[in-house]
């Protein structure tokens, strides 16, 4: 087979193999690729599996057409490629073997050959001229073994990529490249994403027109597609939106939960739902699809104080293959001492960047109404974004979207002529930069609104993430009408005479009011900047950071009613009046949520 005028294919197809590497089903067989570069000097690129010695040597003899090879380049020592190194040297004893130091050690370990006088040891980045063809060797350790190197031919712009860009399947069978290359990649080199990323970085510097892998077809068109998939797989980025449900079931109750969940997911707009019975389906496909899709549900039973063996095997494979960066949820079943969810979660503790669902489904033998509700909640959680993207299913009037706007938190200081005042605000926006214009929005119920309206001056103190809850209590939960918020403190003042905080801020700006917009409940002050100082490189305190890290968790245990999301104040009662204002922080009913 011709690759270019001077590069020929001499590999073989294997239709006898049932399990590649003794574990991966290969219904369409396997190809063991080998190539010959014909030049002033002739190089053979790798050998093939032990079962194909004569077929390969015949292919080679035909292409050599009476000439003798000068070099045998060994890129990878796994026996599916290197089993015939010794046989080759028996037929062509004058050939020089080109490899790296690790490969020569493995050749000795496999064949007892020291190859003194007939080996050329190459270094990373080393080169070899065949006359017209100029070869460069790039080490690619752990893609898939430590000795692996790839070879770039700068003359024909060919990358001989070893196992990289390989796939399951013989070359005389037509099948989709992506699916079988993905199953091959995840199974064979999925663990070594970092090393593949390193190799891709080198490849990005080369002008590559053809990729010649050791398995699967030679790639000569649309290389960006294949390289893009390798980048996705090796960076553990989900390739597609979708949900894999992998389960085991002994008497059908767990399966029933899985079927119910799958139906719910489909009805809620999930673009793809794939279900695997781990006891019966191809484990390698279940594994590769877990890496393909964005979300994974694991459902199994408690068994021998652990989990069902097929699920144990599956999770072990996920962990070994560096599964990460996915949303994962759990369904457990147990009749007397359910442990499955705990065991599954512990097994996956090593996986990085797992977004665990809030909902875990806990079945006690058979599905009951609670489980139905849990499955519904799990489906809602999994499909939230799919529902929101769907024109028919989406709630187009969900005003909680406003809470997703990013806000910083600031202390606005002012002075009424008698005392300094300060309050917390979250709506400070830079409007323009020539000149600098900043808008500050303040509730008219706050005393500061009245003061700033009168004086036309304010300072905006940008709180940093160091600010403790006491700062919010000091400035947010009491009114300047009746309390001197700076009583007893020694204060710093900016050129406009107003206070700026001496700690917990990363910057402040002095503002002069240029314009005012009446917004009903609030007034917007549009200001120019008269002074601006940066105090530290700490991050600005955001509303989200405050919620997650600063605000104490309200003690809602045993209480019924509504809790203020801003300050944690609890309103006890069945219904919250629509015009209710939080007595602590003065936020309205929209900032309350039901307890429980
Ligand atoms: Fe195809 Fe790692 O051998």
Image (tube, grey):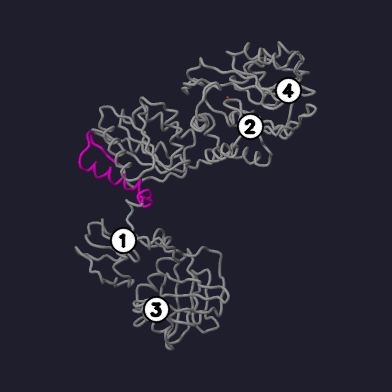
Spatial CA span between label 2 and label 4: 17 Å
Residue that mark 3 sits on: 523
Q: Position of residue 559 (x, y in %)?
A: 22, 59
Q: Nearer the viewer, mark 2 or mark 4?
A: 2
Front-most of residues 367 and 335: 367
Q: Which residues are magenta?
A: 361-390
Q: What is the CA distance from the residue labelled 3 to the residue labelled 2?
A: 65 Å
The disc, 1 or 3, on the residue closer to the chain's N-terminal end is: 3
Q: How many marks?
A: 4
Q: Residue 511's x, y, as percent? A: 51, 79
Q: Quadrant of the C terminus?
A: bottom left
**CA–CA distance between discs 4 and 3?**
80 Å
The answer for how far apart the CA atoms under marks 2 and 1 are is 60 Å
Residue 188, how many percent across, how many down? 53, 29
The residue to which callout 1 is attached is: 554
Q: Earlier in the sequence, mark 4 or mark 3?
A: 4
The reply to whether callout 4 and callout 3 are in contact (CB within 8 Å) is: no
Pointer 1 with pointer 4, Cβ within 8 A: no
Quadrant in the picture for residue 468: bottom left
Secondary structure, mark 4, is strand
Q: Is residue 449 above or below residue 372?
A: below
Q: Is residue 129 left or right of residue 33?
A: right
Question: Which of the two discs, 2 and 4, labels the residue nearer the N terminus?
Answer: 4
Mark 2, secondary structure of its residue = strand
Circle 4 residue: 43
User: Which label is found at residue 211?
Assistant: 2
Look at the picture and state if 58 lies above or below 593.
above
Residue 279 or 510: which is nearer the viewer?
A: 279
Tell which tag, 1 or 4, sits nearer the viewer.
Answer: 4
Sooner in the amino-acid sequence: mark 3 or mark 2: 2
């Amino acid at each position: 087979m011709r690759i270019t005028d001077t590069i020929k294919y001499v590999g073989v197809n294997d239709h006898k193999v049932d399990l590649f590497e003794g574990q991966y089903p290969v219904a369409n067989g396997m190809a063991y690729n080998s190539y010959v570069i014909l030049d002033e000097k002739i190089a053979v690129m790798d050998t093939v599996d032990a079962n194909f010695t004569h077929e390969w040597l015949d292919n080679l003899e035909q292409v050599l057409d009476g000439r003798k090879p000068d070099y045998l380049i060994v890129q990878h020592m796994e026996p599916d490629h290197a089993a015939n190194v010794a046989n080759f040297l028996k037929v062509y004893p004058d050939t020089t073997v080109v490899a790296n130091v690790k490969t020569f050690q493995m050749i000795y370990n496999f064949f007892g050959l020291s190859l003194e006088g007939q080996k050329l040891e190459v270094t990373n980045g080393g080169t070899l001229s065949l006359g017209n063809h100029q070869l460069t060797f790039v080490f690619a350790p752990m893609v898939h073994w430590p000795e692996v190197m790839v070879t770039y031919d700068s003359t024909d712009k060919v990358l001989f990529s070893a196992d990289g860009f390989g796939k399951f399947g013989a070359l005389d069978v037509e099948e989709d490249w992506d699916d079988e290359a993905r199953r091959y990649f995840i199974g064979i080199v999925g663990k070594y994403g970092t090393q593949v990323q390193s190799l891709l970085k080198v490849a990005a510097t080369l002008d590559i027109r053809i990729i010649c892998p050791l398995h699967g077809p030679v790639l000569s068109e649309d290389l960006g597609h294949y390289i893009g998939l390798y980048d996705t797989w090796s960076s553990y980025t989900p390739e597609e939106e979708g949900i894999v449900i992998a389960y085991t079931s002994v008497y059908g109750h767990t399966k029933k939960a899985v079927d119910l969940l799958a139906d719910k997911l489909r009805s809620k707009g999930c673009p793809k739902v794939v279900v695997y019975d781990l006891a019966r389906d191809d484990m390698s496909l279940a594994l590769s699809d877990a890496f393909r899709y964005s979300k994974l549900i694991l459902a199994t039973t408690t068994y021998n104080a652990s989990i069902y063996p097929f699920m144990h095997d599956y999770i072990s494979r996920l962990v070994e293959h560096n599964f990460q960066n996915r949303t994962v949820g759990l369904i457990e079943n147990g009749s007397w001492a359910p442990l499955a969810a705990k065991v599954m979660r512990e097994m996956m503790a090593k996986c990085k960047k797992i977004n665990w669902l809030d909902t875990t489904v806990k079945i006690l033998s058979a599905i009951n109404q609670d489980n139905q509700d849990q499955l519904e909640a799990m489906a809602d959680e999994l499909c939230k974004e799919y529902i929101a993207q769907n024109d028919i299913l989406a709630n187009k009037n969900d005003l909680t979207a406003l809470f997703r706007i990013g806000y910083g938190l600031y202390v606005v200081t002012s002075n009424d002529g008698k005392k300094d005042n300060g309050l917390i605000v979250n709506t400070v926006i830079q409007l323009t930069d020539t000149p600098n214009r900043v808008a500050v929005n303040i509730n008219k119920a706050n005393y500061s609104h009245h003061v700033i309206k009168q004086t036309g001056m304010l300072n905006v103190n940008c709180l940093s993430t160091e600010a403790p809850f006491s700062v919010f209590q000091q400035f947010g939960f009491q009114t300047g009408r009746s309390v001197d918020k700076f009583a007893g403190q020694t204060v710093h003042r900016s050129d406009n005479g107003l206070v700026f905080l001496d700690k917990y801020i990363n910057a402040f700006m002095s503002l002069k009011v240029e314009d005012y917009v009446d917004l009903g409940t609030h007034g917007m002050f549009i200001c120019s900047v008269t002074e601006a100082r940066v105090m530290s490189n700490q991050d600005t305190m955001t509303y989200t950071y405050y919620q997650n890290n600063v605000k104490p968790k309200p003690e809602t245990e045993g209480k019924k009613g509504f809790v203020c999301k801003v300050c944690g104040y609890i309103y006890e009662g069945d219904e919250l009046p629509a015009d209710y204002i939080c007595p602590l922080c003065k936020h309205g009913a929209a900032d309350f949520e039901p307890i429980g």
